[in-house]
Amino acid sequence: MFEMEETQSDLGKVEISPEVIEIIASLAATEVEGVAAMHGGFATGVAEKIGRRNYGKGVKVDLTDEGILIDVQLHMNFGVSIPEVGQQVQENILQTLKTMTALDVKAINIHVVGVHIDHLDKKAFEE
């Protein structure tokens, strides 16, 4: 659990589950134009086929001595600039997390694990 900074209120504390951070980061990543999909494993695919949506897929959150580390695995659309889209994803995740949680993030690592060509004529690539 991530504990938010103490405020002047004596009402108690607020804790944020790592799964919540994963969901926020995953949704923020998919908002960026050029991101085709988040990467999910076999279990995620099976769960989605039976109707359970995993909004945190493709994101791993680690709490280390240095701070919060986030690893994002995603697929991008063919033809986009991977460095530019990757940086936009990092910035969008950082801004969204700051707005929603006020947590400081040490690093957001982007791992491009696939390229989607669905929007192009696939026959052009088969020739």
Image (tube, grey):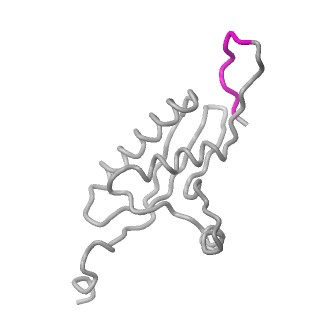
Q: Residue at x 40, y 50 (%)?
A: 31
Q: Position of residue 42 (x, y in %)?
A: 62, 73
Q: Position of residue 33 (x, y in %)?
A: 33, 53
User: Residue extending furthest front?
Assistant: 51
Q: Position of residue 71 (x, y in %)?
A: 54, 49
Tell me: 81 left or right of 108.
left
**Overall secondary structure of the magenta stretch?**
loop
Please, is residue 83 above or below residue 127 in the view?
above
Q: Which quadrant would the C terminus be assigned to in this image?
A: bottom left
The residues colored magenta run 2-9
Camera-side residue: 53 or 29?
53
**Residue 6 magenta-highlighted:** yes
Q: Residue at x 76, y 17 (%)?
A: 11
Q: Residue at x 50, y 57 (%)?
A: 73
Tell me: 89 left or right of 20.
left
**Residue 15 magenta-highlighted:** no
Please, is residue 43 above or below residue 74 in the view?
below
